[in-house]
Image (cartoon, coloured by chain):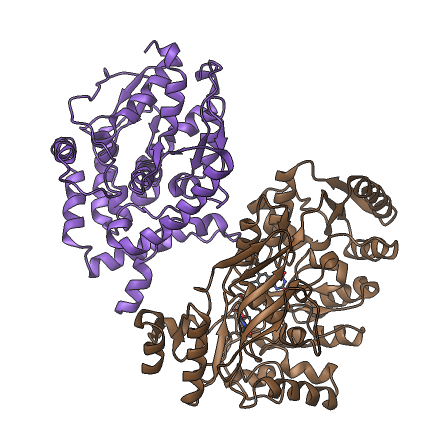
């Protein structure tokens, strides 16, 4: 504590009970332990000093951005030093001609694109949480977003990262040119979930704004028909900029808030965004309209102006936040399945949830088969957690069995580490833990996360059989 | 309630941006108001703030005090803060209106004393549109917004009772201060009586009322006005949700420039700038940066704000700030024959 106060200033080191409780949670339902000391460094040197102080006193450290993570990545376990980067929020340099920018990790995703307004450039990864989540968190979770279908997830937009390694040393991985000489350590670091070190400066690639954008809203009387339309669009060789699905319950929850004119009586809607040259976009609108009607779309609406486009997107991006209208708690699952199995697996999810007598909302990145079933519940209800967990586990199994993967974009964190062996063999896991040890031989950086072999975390190790009151 | 908890609750500026952002409609204002009330019953706000707020409740004192301050200001005895306009009126300029107009214009306390010219502008515009106006005047006094904001629940309730009693009848009450308008609209919830609810239903932000009665506004005279940057006071945008009306009303008379910060707070927050000056300055810094970007983009040099608290706080940072109704009144000047 005194080392930390000496390295930062007293106002930026907190140990109060309120702060320790606040910083013990992220946006997931997962609970680990309590935060130890909470630090708010503002420079790379200060981050390094925090790491050195933690390690010198035998403490683990956990880095945190905005805490919007959904897999418990930033949840503390054994009273670690929490390194919170929200005050490192400067955009350091924008090089328009080379289409890159250097930013600090605490810059909020949307603030960067807003800052670029008028330059004709933007930062392509656009998680639905983009008005709150940090670019450091995006890098650590290799986050996606609706527009990553066409533009690729965060890793494709990170040229270089300055990293404070778990022994306090500062290195730069990657370079502004984006070509790797030797092993691509930048690539290894992205998606590290805070277990490989701390990103303190990030060089991101900027993407040119498309000359023309069209947003379509398609509505269907069955989820199956919507899912088949998704497969048909991709099979026809088109890759929209974004292709999202929302089921009826989501539409009903968000429509009163956004007034986007969503059809609340439809079983599912698809949001399709097309961008590129005007002629190409016009042609794709036609083709998608035809495909949609052969697959039973009730209507196809093309947003008439920017305002309408914004409202349609606002509805999609508000989906999680609207849940409290229905129930106070949610457990969001994030798995990926082959697009051709969408209709079948989504149908199965409704059945699983029905069997457990729960409510589900389905809103997801349909274009890349990334499912986000949200299980809604009231944690105060007796025995409800067991049913939620059972349903969640079954959804993961069904997804993996369908040829899918454990996580699309939210990371493994605490939540999915017990499922890692569903997807990886012991040899795979061993190689991954050697990579981790190469960055962090003493296991001080967010140790209880990602790999099943890592340290355990409070109650959360036995997710399947939780003691009373460990989830809220 | 330890000091850490108190600190985190009292550093909320109560901009209510969270209410606008929340898709689940969590009634945050309700929650924080009740929390503040409990807090202030345990730990009163500083004496100077309570005294200052008490003075606002005494209808004629603010005007008198302002005249004294105005003299002191001209003698350079008053430091420039966000609590006072850059140039206070010396007094004696208050217009009076005859009782019995079809519309009431709520004149409040600070604004009535410090910036009577804004009420004049409102009156000029309404009169130009053929309406007759009665000002509520010094006898009605303060709406209690600042008291409620500081957690002084009992004082706020008392002020609400007095204002309602002083303004019987069913004439619409137009308000040109977003903070007062929001407070008057909350009387129904604050007192929980049918009479208070009926009173609140008569309250309109002046832009809100004009936007719904656009025929009142004369045709613009075609004079191309200088562009102005629109600042949305939190109490207009988040609390009342009628910020669009400012655009409807001023749009025909001036070129409007939008900010790119989606209604970020300016940091003034009623008494917040006194209680948490450092934090308020930091918040204002972000606002100033957004305004700077808008100036750069558009060449505008003036900001319009429909709330005197925001206007004064931004003026204290060196900006030129006007009330939207002043812009409209000026555009109508020819017609008004001045
Ligand atoms: C409403 C909502 C919608 C969402 N939508 C999406 C979506 O569309 N797509 C998507 O991919 N995700 C989504 N998410 C999940 C989440 O927003 C992302 O994972 C985001 O990138 C996390 O950023 P953060 O700053 O909140 O990170 P945190 O939650 O604070 O941290 C996440 C992980 O990153 C590590 N970390 C944080 N900063 C650094 C750093 N500088 N260096 C090293 N490690 C670091 C932490 O240790 C932790 O393991 C959503 C979340 C919510 C609540």
Q: How many marks?
A: 0
What quarter of the picture does the C terminus of chain B occupy?
A: top left
Q: Is residue B223 above or below residue A104?
A: above
Q: Is residue B203 left or right of residue B116?
A: right
The answer to which of A247 and B13 lies nearer the viewer is: B13
Q: Residue at x 76, y 46 (%)?
A: A276
Q: Where is residue B307? Give x, y as percent.
A: 34, 36
Q: Does residue A81 appear in this view?
A: no
Q: Is residue B304 left or right of residue B55?
A: right
Chain drawn in brown: A
Q: Colour of chain B?
A: purple
Q: Where is residue B215? Give x, y as percent.
A: 47, 16
What quarter of the picture does the N terminus of chain B occupy?
A: bottom left
Q: Does residue A241 appear in this view?
A: yes
Q: Where is residue A14? Give x, y as percent.
A: 35, 73
Q: Is residue B198 above or below residue B31?
A: above
Q: Residue at x 74, y 40 (%)?
A: A301
Q: Is residue B171 left or right of residue A272?
A: left
Q: Quadrant of residue A352?
A: bottom right
Quarter of the picture for ligand 1? bottom right
Q: Where is residue A310? Give x, y as percent.
A: 62, 44
């Amino acid at each position: 504590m005194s080392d930390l106060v000496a390295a930062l200033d007293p106002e930026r080191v907190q140990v109060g009970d309120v702060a320790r409780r606040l910083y013990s949670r992220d946006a997931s339902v997962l609970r680990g332990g309590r935060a130890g000391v909470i630090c708010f460094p503002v420079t790379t040197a200060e981050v390094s000093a925090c790491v050195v102080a933690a390690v010198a006193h035998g403490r683990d450290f956990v880095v945190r951005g905005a805490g919007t993570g959904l897999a418990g990545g930033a949840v503390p376990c054994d009273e670690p030093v929490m390194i919170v980067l929200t005050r490192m929020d400067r955009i350091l340099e924008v090089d328009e001609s080379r289409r890159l920018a250097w930013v600090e990790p605490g810059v909020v995703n949307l603030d960067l694109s807003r800052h670029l307004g008028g330059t004709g450039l933007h930062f392509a990864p656009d998680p639905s949480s983009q008005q709150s989540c940090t670019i450091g968190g995006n890098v650590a979770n290799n986050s996606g977003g609706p527009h990553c279908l066409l533009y690729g997830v965060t890793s494709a937009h990170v040229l270089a990262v300055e990293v404070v390694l778990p022994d306090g040393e500062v290195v730069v991985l990657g370079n502004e040119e984006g070509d790797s000489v030797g092993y691509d350590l930048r690539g290894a670091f992205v998606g590290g979930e805070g277990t490989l070190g701390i990103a303190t400066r990030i060089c991101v690639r900027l993407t040119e704004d498309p000359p023309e954008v069209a947003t379509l809203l398609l509505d269907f009387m069955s989820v199956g028909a919507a899912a088949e339309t998704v497969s048909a669009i991709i099979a026809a060789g088109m890759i929209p900029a974004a292709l999202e699905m929302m089921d009826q319950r989501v539409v009903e929850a968000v429509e009163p808030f956004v007034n986007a004119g969503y059809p609340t009586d439809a079983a599912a809607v698809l949001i399709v965004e097309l961008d590129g040259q005007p002629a190409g976009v016009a042609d794709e609108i036609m083709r998608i309209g035809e495909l949609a009607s052969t697959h039973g779309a009730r209507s196809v609406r093309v947003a008439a102006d920017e305002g309408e486009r914004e409202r349609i997107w606002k509805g999609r991006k508000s989906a999680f936040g609207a849940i409290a209208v229905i129930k106070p708690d949610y457990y969001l699952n994030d798995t990926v399945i082959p697009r051709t199995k969408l209709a079948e697996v989504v149908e199965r999810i409704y059945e699983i949830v029905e069997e457990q007598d729960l409510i589900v909302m389905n809103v997801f990145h349909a274009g890349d088969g990334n499912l986000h079933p949200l299980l809604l519940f009231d944690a105060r209800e007796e025995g409800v957690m067991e049913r939620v967990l059972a349903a969640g586990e079954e959804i993961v199994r069904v997804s993996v069995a369908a040829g899918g993967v454990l996580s699309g974009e939210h990371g493994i964190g605490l939540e999915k580490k017990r499922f890692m062996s569903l997807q990886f063999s012991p040899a795979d896991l061993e190689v991954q833990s050697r990579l981790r040890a190469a960055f962090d031989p003493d296991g001080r950086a967010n140790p209880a996360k990602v790999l099943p072999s890592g340290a355990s975390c409070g109650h959360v190790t036995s997710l399947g059989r939780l003691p009373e009151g460990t989830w809220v | 309630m330890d000091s850490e908890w108190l600190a985190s609750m009292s550093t909320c500026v109560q901009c209510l941006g969270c209410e606008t952002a929340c898709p689940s409609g969590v009634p945050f204002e309700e929650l924080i108001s009740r929390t503040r009330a409990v807090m202030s019953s345990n730990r009163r706000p500083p004496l100077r703030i309570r005294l200052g707020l008490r003075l606002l409740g005494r209808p004629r004192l603010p005007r008198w005090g302002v005249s004294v301050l105005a003299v002191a200001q001209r003698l350079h005895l008053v430091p420039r803060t966000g609590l006072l306009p850059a140039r206070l009126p010396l007094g004696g300029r208050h217009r009076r209106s005859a009782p019995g107009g079809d519309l009431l214009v709520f004149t409040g306390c600070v604004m009535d004393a410090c910036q009577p010219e804004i009420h004049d502008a409102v009156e000029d515009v309404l009169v130009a549109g053929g309406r007759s106006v009665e000002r509520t005047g010094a006898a009605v006094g303060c709406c209690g917004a600042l008291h409620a904001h500081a957690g002084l629940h009992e004082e706020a309730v008392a002020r609400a009772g007095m204002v309602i009693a002083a303004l019987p009848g069913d004439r619409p009450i137009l308000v040109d201060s977003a903070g007062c308008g929001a407070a008057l609209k909350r009387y129904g919830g604050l007192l929980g009586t049918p009479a208070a609810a009926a009173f609140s239903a008569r309250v309109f932000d002046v832009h809100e009322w004009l936007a719904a009665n656009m025929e009142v506004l004369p045709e613009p005279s075609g004079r191309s006005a200088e562009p102005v940057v629109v600042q949305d006071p939190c109490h207009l945008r988040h609390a009342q949700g009628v910020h669009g009306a400012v655009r409807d009303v001023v749009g025909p008379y001036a070129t409007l420039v939008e900010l790119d910060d989606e209604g970020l707070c300016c940091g003034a927050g009623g008494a917040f700038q006194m209680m948490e000056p450092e934090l308020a300055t930091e918040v204002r810094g972000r606002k100033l940066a957004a305004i700077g970007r808008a100036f750069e983009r558009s060449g505008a040099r003036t900001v319009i704000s429909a709330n005197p608290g925001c206007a004064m706080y931004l003026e204290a940072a060196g900006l030129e700030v006007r009330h939207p109704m002043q812009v409209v009144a000026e555009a109508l000047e020819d017609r008004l024959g001045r």
